[in-house]
Image: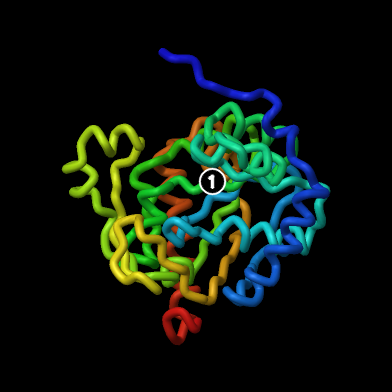
Amino acid sequence: MAAVDVDPGETTKWDPGLTEKVMGRLRPLIKGYHRAEVHGLETFPNGGALVVSNHSGGLFPMDVPVFATGFYERFGYDRPVYTLSHDMLMTGPTADFFRKTGFIRANHENADEALRSGGVVVVFPGGDYDVYRPTLAANKIDFAGRTGYVRAALNAGVPIVPMVGVGGQETQLFLSRGTAVAKALGPVARLARTKIVPLSFGFPFGFSAVLPLNVPLPSKIVMKTLPPIDVTAEFGENPDIDEVDAHVRHVMQRALDELAAQRRFPVIG
């Protein structure tokens, strides 16, 4: 088995001063363009916590900026928000910037280190599969069967904080994940480490298969954190991982349905 490429100091590179400056510059976009709201933070636990969320917005997901803006506004910059991220984000000239603002490679070692340090770790179990879900399934919780997040919370001894967001999948019209296209591309898709070639329709170019890049519509984005789930207290010392996952997705689906029911119009909110 190949060794995992882990930088043991990755979580220590978070820079609260830089993060505060970035949040200050993002806030007009978050609050103005997307009229973002974050609810439920009054029940957010102290110490380390694993925030498990649905993922929306295609190539330009706003889940992390929206949540981070709301979290830091309420709690300040003493506790970092880390985001488990694809390796591609952590390479190249921008990698250092992302590390300093809380992005870390998505592996169990980094998650455990961040959670045990008292940080808040955001994970999107559905990943690309979720972020490119068709607009017609915008309000469906679907992690594609991935349950590793439950083990991550158990290993670190931290609660799971479910979080749901609505509006991000209205920033353009997502038509298909394009799994058949990816399969047809064969080695090209494998080289890019993807099983999807998403198809969408947006402004100003219309139809897009990843390219050309359309501008996200100014959809109102609302996110809500739910009460924390203490896995051991609720499911015992040796919980059934699938049972915990089913429970997490159930409470998330119920909350997402409630948020969706409050929207009067697409994009407008």
Where disc 1 sits, the SS reads strand
> Which image quadrant for residue 2?
top left
- From this viewpoint, is residue 19 visible? yes
Residue 238: percent from the left, percent from the top? 50, 31
* Residue ranking furthest to the bottom: 264
**Vertical relation: 47 (above or below) 237:** below
Q: Residues within 10 Å of mark 1 (few under 14, many from 20)?
A: many
Query: Which residue shows up at 34% across the image and 46% down it?
Result: 144
Q: Quadrant of residue 82?
A: top right
Q: Quadrant of the N terminus?
A: top left
Q: Residue 157: name its quadrant.
A: top right
Q: In percent of the image, x 63 and y 69: which residue is there? A: 30
Which residue is situated farthest in the top direction here?
Answer: 1
Which kind of residue does numbered mark 1 sit on? Val
User: Viewer-proximal residue, 194 or 97?
Assistant: 97
Asked if residue 165 is positioned above or below residue 155 in the image, the reply reads: below
Rendered residue at 56%/41% (across/down): 84
Horizontally, is 20 left or right of 26 in the view? right
Looking at the picture, tell me which residue is in the foreground, 79 or 257. 79
x and y, in percent, of residue 215 in the image: 46, 68
Residue matched to label 1: 123
> Viewed as shown, does residue 101 lie left or right of 202?
right
